[in-house]
Amino acid sequence: FQGYPRILDSFFSTLKNLLHELSLDKPNPPIPSGLDLVDEDDQYKHTISLHDPGELEPMLDVFQYDEQFWMKLINELIEEKLLVNID
């Protein structure tokens, strides 16, 4: 794009103007007025460290296939599709 400085300048100028106009049309307060905030005294803060390895829960890493669950889900989906096709 080095050979087209005037085109690039025009493009970025237009983009800047569009972004400026859009920001003027919509007021975006940092905190919406209708938002129900929790008082700081009632908040729970969870502090974690990214450097500590943390506690491992190996049981959560195991996938156990439940054929009854999947068959029930498949049957429900087929039944829904049949009902939709009937209507």
Image (spheres, helix red, strand yellow):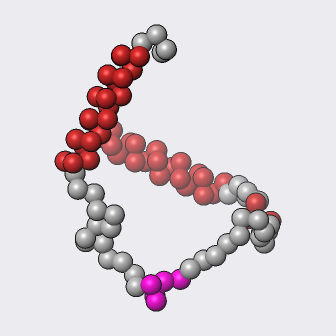
Q: Quadrant of the C terminus?
A: top left
Position of 85 relative to 4 (above/below): below
Q: Which residue is at a point 27% across and 42% down the rendered structure image?
A: 20
Q: Compared with residue 23, is residue 28 higher up or lower down, i.e. above or below?
A: below
Could you tell me residue 41's position as x and y percent? 46, 89
Is residue 43 covered in magenta? yes
Outermost left residue: 25
Q: Residue furthest top?
A: 3
In this view of the protein, which residue sits in the foreground, 14 or 37? 14
Q: Residue 5, located in which quarter of the rendered image? A: top left
- Residue 37 placed where, x, y %? 36, 78
Toward the viewer: 36 or 78?
36
The residue drawn where x is 60% and y is 58% is 69
Rendered view: 11 above or below 49: above
Q: Is residue 59 visible?
A: no
Would residue 8 be found to the left or right of residue 25 on screen? right
Task: Give the vertical position of 44 relative to 48 (above or below).
Answer: below
Q: How many marks?
A: 0
Q: Position of residue 39 (x, y in %)?
A: 40, 85
Q: Is residue 54 visible?
A: yes
Q: Nearer the viewer, residue 11 or 33?
A: 11
Question: Going by the image, does 38 lie left or right of 70?
Answer: left
Question: What residue appears at the point 76 percent right and 59 percent down from the top-left corner?
Answer: 62
Is residue 16 rendered to the left or right of residue 63? Answer: left
Relative image position of residue 8 (x, y in whole percent): 39, 20
- What's the magenta bit mostly, secondary-structure-wise? helix
Judging depth in this view, the residue of 1 and 48 nearest the camera is: 1
Residue at (72, 64) in percent of width and height: 50
Which span is picked out in magenta?
A: 40-44
